[in-house]
Image (cartoon, grey):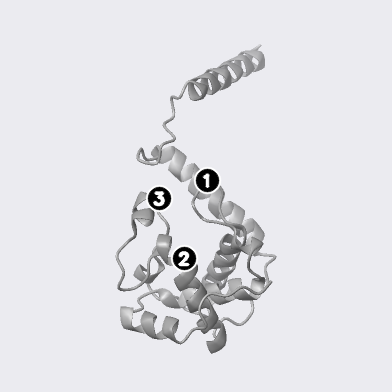
């Protein structure tokens, strides 16, 4: 008797929830932020998904100077509208995003030799290559090869604490935006 009562309550709650959502109870517009529980759930799902897939990713050496140069040119051409760059103000596009895109140059510089840094690098690779659903993050792996994506990862890892002058030097010495298909 208790199990059937619990099943009825859960089923009824699910049906009421679906009806409420179908009637627009949850505001999906980007100017209305998620409920804290929704935001926590999305964050947990995103992190769990990346963690599950990152363990199978093989990362190349990311300190290669030519890789950094390739990454700088591609980042400057493809990423700054959402993720900004040192010395630049956020674009109108970036300001209108929800969730907001990470601003990598405002983060602390990343160490290259610890396990957490390697995990983040693999996560960056996965996100750049495959994108993230229901955000503005595109799947660049559809138009760029893995080597180019790893170059962007290498550059993103160097962005933390980078000055505007350092950024200009790296992007000026790059080969600009290119594709290797």
Instruction: Give left or right: position of 27 versus 17.
Output: left
Where residue 174 appears, as percent x and y from the top left, is 49, 84
Q: Please say whether residue 64 is visible from this viewpoint.
A: no
Q: Earlier in the sequence, mark 1 or mark 3?
A: 3
Residue 35 seen by the camera: yes
Nearer the observer, disc 1 or disc 2? 2
Which quadrant of the figure has residue 11? Answer: top right
Disc 1 to disc 2, how far (Cα)?
17 Å
Helix, strand, or loop for circle 1? Answer: loop
Pointers 1 and 3 in contact (CB under 8 A)? no
Residue receiving disc 2:
79
* Image quarter in which the C terminus is found: bottom right
Q: Position of residue 62 (x, y in %)?
A: 57, 81
Residues at marks 1 and 2 touching, judged by CB atoms closer than 8 Å: no
Instruction: Give the mark nearest the N terminus, 2 or 3.
Output: 2
Pointer 1 residue: 134
Q: Is mark 2 on a helix, strand or loop?
A: loop
Q: Please state which of residues 143 and 130 is positioned toward the viewer in this rendering.
A: 143
* Mark 3, residue position: 97
Residue at image coords 39%, 86%: 169
| Distance (Cα) linking label 1 and label 3 | 11 Å
């Amino acid at each position: 008797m208790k199990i059937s009562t619990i099943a009825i309550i859960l089923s009824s709650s699910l049906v009421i929830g679906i009806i409420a959502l179908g009637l627009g109870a949850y505001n999906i517009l980007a100017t209305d932020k998620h409920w804290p529980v929704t935001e926590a759930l999305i964050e947990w799902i995103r992190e769990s998904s990346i963690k599950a897939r990152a363990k199978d990713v093989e990362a190349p050496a990311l300190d290669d100077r030519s890789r950094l140069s390739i990454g700088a040119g591609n980042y400057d051409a493809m990423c700054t509208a959402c993720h900004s760059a040192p010395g630049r103000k956020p674009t109108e596009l970036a300001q209108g995003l929800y969730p907001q895109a990470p601003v990598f140059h405002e983060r602390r510089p990343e160490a290259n030799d610890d396990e957490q840094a390697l995990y983040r690098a693999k996560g960056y690779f996965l996100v750049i290559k495959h994108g993230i659903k229901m955000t503005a993050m595109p799947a660049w792996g559809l138009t760029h090869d893995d080597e180019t994506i790893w170059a962007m990862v290498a550059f993103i890892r160097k962005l933390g604490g980078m000055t505007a002058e350092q950024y200009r030097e790296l992007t000026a010495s790059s080969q600009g935006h290119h594709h290797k298909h």
